[in-house]
Amino acid sequence: MTKLRGRSTGPDGLAALAGVVSAAVVLSVAELIGAFFTSRATPLFALGSTFIDFTPPWMKDFAVTTFGTNDKAALFAGMGLTIAVLACVLGVVAYRNWALGVLGVLFMGAVIVACVVTRAGVGSADAIPSVLGTLAGLVVLRRLVVLLWRLKARPEAPAGTDADPNNQGQSVGTSRRRFFAAAGITAVAAAVTAAGGRLLSAARSNVSQARQALRLPSPAKAAAPVPPGVQSSVPGVTPWLTPNNAFYRIDTALSVPEINVNDWKLRVHGMVEQEVTLTFEDLLDAGLIESHITLTCVSNPVGGDLVGNATWLGLPLRDVLARAKPTGGADMVLSTSVDGFSASTPLEVLQDGRDAMLAIGMNGEPLPLEHGYPVRMVVPGLYGFVSATKWVVDLEVTRFADNKAYWTTRGWSEHGPIKTMARVEVPKSFAKVPAGKVAVGGTAWAQTRGISKVEIQIDNGPWAEATLSAEASTLTWRQWSYEWDATPGPHYIKVRATDGTGQLQTEQRADPVPDGASGWQSVMVTVQ
Ligand SMILES: Nc1nc2c(c(=O)[nH]1)N[C@H]1C(S)=C(S)[C@@H](COP(=O)(O)O)O[C@H]1N2
Ligand SMILES: [Mo]
């Protein structure tokens, strides 16, 4: 008790607390009012998205390697901490010099509003939640600071006499309690307001229900049947077909865009003879195809799991382009999502006959919201960052010389063909296994080229061929298994693949930046 009531929590400490509580009010009020505006326009989402846009490639790479698909949670945590520190400073400034504090708060409010209104697909009216939130925060800050000034106006208790009932500690204590009560009540109110805002926006959004009610047509051209034996015989190897809820998710969207199918439109323009606009209805009525395609993220490290295999339903992009008729000289299609992400895909790849599509279905369901509902691109053989635009709304036929995509302006490559890769999944790295016959298994991929061989090397022994599982198509990954006669001690299992053209996977180690990781994976296991 003495600690709280004594000089250890000086006025600056309390002022910092006032700052944090006021910041919570800014965010929660904006969150609540934001339920009636574009969901991506509340301060936290807008600040976070802006931060992501300015993330240098090494930091994106670090975030994905360190936090994997939890990178967004990590970003929110980091942002929360930064905001808390800034709020402490602003609280102290406001306590010492109110006018300066107000300026600081208004400046922060302006930064938030700037982040909000510069988001793609966000209108200037979307600034309203942030503006009202900032004003509410200012009112609360004023109230708390006034309480602190009153506290300061009282004569200080003489040192070491806190427990003496006859000194002024009583009234200082009362003021303190009043401050803590006000701060506490406001903090609780802010938490309730924020939770209410989240619930309200969830209730107001009906996109998720609309998705559930949506029935997709069957394809005009069904996918080639999956041959038996695509799954590795080794227990514990990844399922050959990745269930939607286990499919990796990578994107810059902090708040998943919510698009109504009735509002969705795709504009195809640029270097075309005929500008084309497609509605969702148009897609449903067109000749849809279905295809098994393995998607891979360029940020996937050697041995990583940012890769998944699904059955996609969609309209071939070559059909879409045939309607628009690209003019000579065009060599790229810049696809843009509703939230401003963009990808540059070579025009020829979209016309060369591979199953590149505007996908609406994933494993027999409409696309899950976080995988691009209602429409995304899927292009076999290219990393997602140059091809797999989710929530896609715009295709511009253009030239690499004239336009740059989202990640290309941030240090990543312009082109992104998928590199041949093999991965050991069983046993896991650093596993302890009993001596004798050990089942080794995993997956390899080289989309559009296929996998013709996977080899295993134990320690520095000879390379031995693994048994390949059946191949569904060259657009999908291929699993493998190998029986290892393990002797006690520590051992290294190394893996490498050869693609369908006979090209051996490169041993050359490369980081994901700028165009994908490479190298042979090696896992260490202990045989007992
Ligand atoms: N709108 C949008 N689409 C996007 C991205 C993005 O950030 N925004 N990321 C791309 C990247 S880098 C990859 S690897 C794939 C991942 O798709 P998935 O999340 O469905 O697995 O989406 C691509 N499409
Ligand atoms: Mo990616």
Image (cartoon, rainbow, N blue to C red):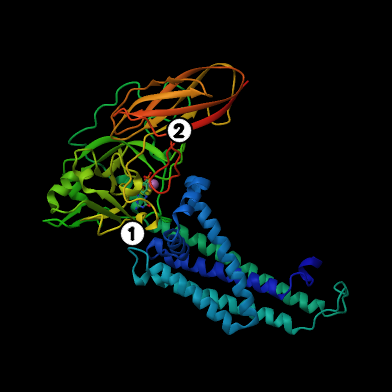
In the rendered view, tell whether residue 523 sits above or below residue 157: above
> Disc 1 to disc 2, how far (Cα)?
36 Å
**In this rendering, position of residue 32 left or right of residue 267:** right
Query: Is residue 21 among what the camera can see?
Result: no
Identify the amino acid type marked 2. Trp
Assess whether mark 2 and mark 1 are in contact (beta carbons under 8 angstroms). Answer: no
Quarter of the image where the N terminus is located: bottom right
In the rendered view, tell whether residue 407 sits above or below residue 237: below
Image spot of residue 200 (x, y percent): 44, 60
Q: Which residue is mark 1?
A: 340
314 or 456: nearer the viewer: 456
Q: Which residue is mark 2?
A: 520
Image spot of residue 194 (x, y percent): 51, 62
318 or 168: nearer the viewer: 318
Quarter of the image where the C terminus is located: top right
Image spot of residue 70 (x, y percent): 50, 48
For marks 1 and 2, give the one nearer the viewer: 2
Q: Residue furthest left?
A: 273
Could you say which quadrant of the image residue 37 lies in? bottom left
* Tally of numbered discs: 2
Query: Is residue 224 among what the camera can see?
Result: yes
In the rendered view, tell whether residue 432 sits above or below residue 187: above
Image spot of residue 316 (x, y percent): 20, 42
Residue depicted at x 29% and y 49%: 374
Residue depicted at x 81% and y 67%: 2
Element type where label 2 sits in the image: loop
Element type where label 1 sits in the image: loop
Residue depicted at x 11% and y 56%: 273
Label 2 crowding class (10 Å Cα cut-off): few <14, some 14-19, many 20+? some
Label 1 crowding class (10 Å Cα cut-off): few <14, some 14-19, many 20+? some
